């Protein structure tokens, strides 16, 4: 298993400019174990599609089609609505209707799509007749909904939406929950602004791995691949561990890098405006003005009074007040001590006096049995030094004890006297100091009242305070400038380096943790490719960056480097491989539904099409209860790709719906 | 505090409490023998009176509270003078004899003192025992011999008992009619007392007394 704390320790060793907890904060990931490659064992299966509407010709559309587990084929001539049908299915599953051709969209009034996720049956019902798209998701089959009519129980409605946007969002949330998908993020820049734009993958993005459109056969995932969305689809479908963490830290790094760019930019701007040397010059001249003014002021001051005397008096006052406070504190401390001593003294004196009385008392009664003590017992105590009651040995301690108490009392008395004398002395000292302090105060007040009568030039005072304010402002500017130049940007730089390091670290660990699953996927894709007749591909390699590469004649080729005919088969092989990974090993999160639109139009030769058809047939035979493939084609060869009852064949010039 | 300075002081204090706060026994009563002259009831009462002797500040506070409760019954001027004298003599500092807080308030074991007072024939001690062997209804009788010793020797010839005698009289005057439990309830109204953890010394309330004194008499102690 991956250990976050090990990662922190490893990285901390390399970047000791940060404390360990700083590194921890920087690399904190809220949900490091979010990803799991273990299959949810959920598959998506389309059961039935009903389309109602009216074409612009006035022809009523009442299309209803059942789909089956396994391989389904829809055969019709090009331009007769196969793609539209698939796009309507996409609409039903994702809420995205943008790809449906505008004219076809106008025909549609109602779309009902019944599908299964695992054992549960759902139906999306979309009403397009009004101004706004209304969408409902039921936990019911179409037949059950039709049977219930208006009386359908509210509990079987998962959501109801009134806008396109809501419908799309709710469908995404629903599917995300079912398949443990989530959105992966990336940032992008823009010429118009210095800020970053945040983007994220959506259910629509992941749907690219279900719906293979004919325009996309030259790419594995997407035509225009912003922010490596293709790679993100694969990461999500495989559920590779640490994917969330990598994505999270990459985001963070991008934002920090952006802050740094911003800062650099601002600094450049500032530097253009502020010339530090000029500032320093200005500051020096202001300081000169200030000291000149202050000198003038002092001179005026000295003319009218003795500033030196004032200063020394203030100092003296402070000193004497300090001494006064010290003496008061000392007195309080001594008083406490005296209290303690007196307390002890009282106790000992009482003890001595009471003891003298009590210890000479005659023992008359046994406290246990309340009998009078007999005189012979008393005799025994005297002669044998044994207690007359319990016969324990008696220690002859009383004279010594008394002496000890006497000595202690004398000591305490002396101590009390000393303390009292010391307190007296302190009281005297405090009085003296207080008098001195008062005298100083009177003299100072005299000088202060003189000051008030001295004429100052108000203008000078204003100028001085203005100058001081200017000085402070310039000093601040200089300080900020030097601050911005050094610390912050360096720190950001270091942080970015740490993040980059961590991302690399996580990537290599992810690869290590995913070794087995990637290896299995490679093998599955290879065997499918070979079945498809691409025998010159001798190995499939998934690179560190999750690029799928194909070994041909000793050369590793990327998908884009394959020929068109090869690409189609490699792509289908790849997706079959993904589905088989789940079926055979219980790994990955592909929904095991594949909609293949018009595979191999012109560029694939007939022989290859026949082998394609036979492979689909083979899949139908082996896995018909484990996956679903819907193929739309205009090619005769593919009509035989499945069992005949799963083939919808339209005749010449006939529309699908 | 080592043992040396608290062997006989405690004995004397408890003895004086028993003496000053006990009642004459009705001569016609048949419940006790002739030589028992006075009777004192309940150990709790000993403990609570002892507390007031040992904490002059608490005593002052109680007196002030008494004044607040019912001014008509009490001589305001006398209370003022008593408290002033307690504080002038610095009693809360030098006379305070710390007591531990126990389950039922201030408490200190006095069994050995009682045993001593019994053996020297000052008192006779009676109690009942319940089924669990626990003593209850503790009664202390002062013997004729004991009373004679207290009156003729202790109070007359031992100077340092004077303070205790005066203090007992003062407490008796204002709180003498209260039982141990009533005294305890009064003492529990003090937050400092009630909130003292078990087995820790109860702290003084000098500041509270000073504040209350000021608010009642309008002058500082």
Image (cartoon, rainbow, N blue to C red):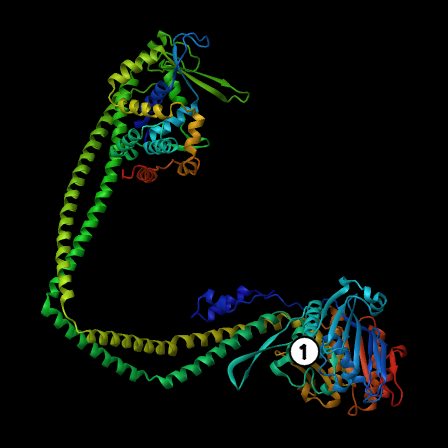
Position of residue A342 relative to residue A441, above or below, is above
Question: How many other residues sit within 10 Å of disc 1, few (<14), some (14-19) or many (≥20)?
Answer: some
* Left or right of B2, for residue A219: right
The residue located at (9%, 70%) in the rendering is A303
Q: Position of residue A318 (x, y in %)?
A: 18, 56
Residue A644: which quarter of the image? bottom right
Considering the image in quadrants, where does the C terminus of chain B appear?
top left
The residue located at (13%, 49%) in the rendering is A435
> What subunit carries mark 1?
A
Position of residue A11 relative to residue B60, above or below, is below
Q: Position of residue A379 (x, y in %)?
A: 33, 9
Q: Which residue is mark 1?
A: A205
Position of residue B189 relative to residue A355, above or below, is below
Q: Position of residue B55 (x, y in %)?
A: 34, 32
Question: Which residue is farthest front?
Answer: B72
* Left or right of A148, for residue A212: left
Instruction: Name the one closer to the observer, A154 or A527.
Output: A154
Q: Position of residue A27 (x, y in %)?
A: 52, 69
Position of residue B111 relative to residue A116, above or below, is above
């Amino acid at each position: 298993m991956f250990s976050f704390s090990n990662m922190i320790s490893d990285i901390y060793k390399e970047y000791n400019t940060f404390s360990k907890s700083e590194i921890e904060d920087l690399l904190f990931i809220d949900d490091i174990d979010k990803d799991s490659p273990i299959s949810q064992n959920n598959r998506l299966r389309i059961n039935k599609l009903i389309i109602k509407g009216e074409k612009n010709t006035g022809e009523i559309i009442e299309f209803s089609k059942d789909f089956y587990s396994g391989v389904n084929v829809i055969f019709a001539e090009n331009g007769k609505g196969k793609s539209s049908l698939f796009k309507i299915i996409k609409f039903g599953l994702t809420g995205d209707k943008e790809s449906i051709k505008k004219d076809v969209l106008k025909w549609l009034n109602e779309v009902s799509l019944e599908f299964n996720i695992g054992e549960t049956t759902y139906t999306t019902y979309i009403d397009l007749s009004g101004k706004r798209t209304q969408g409902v998701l039921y936990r019911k089959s179409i037949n059950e909904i039709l049977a219930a009519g208006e009386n359908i129980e509210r509990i079987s409605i998962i959501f109801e939406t009134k806008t396109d946007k809501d419908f799309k969002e709710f469908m995404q949330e629903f599917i995300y929950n079912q398949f443990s998908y989530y959105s992966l993020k990336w940032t992008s820049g823009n010429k118009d602004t210095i800020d970053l734009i945040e983007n994220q993958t959506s259910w629509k993005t992941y749907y690219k791995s279900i719906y293979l459109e004919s325009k996309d056969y030259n790419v594995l995932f997407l035509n225009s691949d912003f922010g490596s969305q293709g790679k993100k689809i694969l990461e999500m479908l495989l559920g590779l561990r640490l994917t969330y963490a990598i994505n999270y830290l990459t985001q963070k790094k991008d934002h920090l890098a952006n802050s740094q760019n911003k800062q650099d930019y601002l600094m450049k701007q500032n530097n253009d405006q502020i010339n530090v040397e000029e500032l320093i010059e200005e500051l020096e001249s202001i300081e000169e003005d200030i000291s000149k003014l202050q000198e003038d002021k002092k001179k005026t001051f000295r003319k009218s009074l003795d500033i030196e005397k004032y200063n020394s008096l203030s100092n003296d006052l402070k000193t004497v007040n300090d001494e006064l406070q010290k003496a008061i504190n000392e007195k309080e401390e001594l008083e406490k001590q005296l209290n303690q001593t007196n307390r002890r003294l009282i106790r000992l004196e009482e003890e001595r006096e009471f003891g003298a009385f009590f210890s000479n008392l005659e023992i008359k009664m046994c406290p246990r049995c309340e009998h009078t003590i007999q005189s012979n017992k008393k005799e025994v105590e005297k002669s044998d030094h044994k207690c007359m009651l319990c016969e324990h040995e008696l220690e002859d301690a009383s004279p010594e004890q008394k002496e000890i108490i006497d000595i202690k009392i004398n000591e305490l008395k002396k101590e009390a006297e000393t303390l009292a004398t010391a307190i007296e002395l302190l009281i005297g000292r405090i009085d003296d100091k207080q008098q001195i302090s008062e005298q100083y105060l009177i003299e100072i007040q005299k000088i202060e009242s003189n000051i008030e009568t001295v004429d100052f030039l108000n203008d000078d005072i204003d100028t001085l305070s203005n100058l001081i304010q200017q000085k402070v402002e310039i000093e601040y500017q200089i300080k900020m400038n030097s601050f911005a130049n050094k610390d912050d940007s360096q720190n950001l730089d270091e942080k970015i380096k740490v993040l980059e390091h961590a991302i690399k670290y996580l990537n290599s660990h992810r690869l290590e943790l995913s070794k087995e699953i990637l290896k299995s996927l490679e093998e599955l894709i290879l065997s499918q490719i070979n079945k498809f007749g691409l025998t010159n591909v001798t190995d499939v390699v998934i690179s560190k960056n999750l690029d799928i590469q194909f070994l041909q004649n000793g050369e590793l080729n990327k998908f884009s480097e394959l020929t068109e005919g090869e690409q189609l088969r490699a792509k289908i092989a790849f997706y079959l491989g993904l589905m088989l990974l789940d079926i055979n090993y219980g790994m990955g999160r592909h929904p095991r539904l594949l909609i293949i639109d018009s595979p191999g139009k012109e560029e694939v030769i007939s022989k290859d099409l026949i082998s394609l058809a036979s492979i689909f047939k083979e899949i139908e035979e082996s896995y018909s209860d484990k996956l679903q493939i819907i193929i739309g084609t205009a090619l005769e060869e593919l009509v035989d790709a499945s069992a005949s009852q799963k083939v919808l064949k339209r005749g010449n010039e006939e529309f699908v719906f | 505090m080592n043992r040396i300075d608290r062997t006989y002081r405690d004995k004397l204090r408890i003895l004086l409490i028993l003496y000053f706060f006990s009642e004459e026994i009705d001569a016609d009563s048949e419940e006790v023998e002739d030589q028992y002259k006075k009777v004192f009831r309940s150990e709790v009462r000993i403990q609570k009176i002892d507390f007031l002797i040992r904490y002059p500040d608490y005593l002052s506070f109680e007196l002030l509270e008494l004044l607040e409760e019912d001014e008509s019954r009490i001589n305001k001027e006398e209370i003022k003078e008593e408290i002033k004298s307690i504080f002038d003599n610095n009693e809360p500092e030098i006379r305070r004899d710390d007591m531990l807080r126990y389950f039922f308030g201030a408490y200190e074991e006095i069994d050995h003192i009682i045993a001593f007072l019994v053996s020297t024939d000052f008192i006779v001690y009676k109690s009942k025992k319940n089924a669990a062997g626990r003593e209850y209804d503790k009664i202390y009788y002062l013997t004729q011999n004991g009373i004679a010793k207290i009156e003729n020797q202790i109070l007359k010839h031992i100077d340092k008992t004077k303070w205790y005698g005066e203090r007992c009289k003062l407490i008796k005057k204002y709180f003498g009619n209260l039982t141990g439990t009533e005294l305890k309830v009064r003492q529990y109204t003090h937050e400092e007392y009630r909130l003292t953890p078990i087995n820790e010394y109860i702290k003084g309330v000098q500041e509270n007394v000073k504040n209350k004194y000021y608010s009642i008499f309008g002058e500082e102690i």
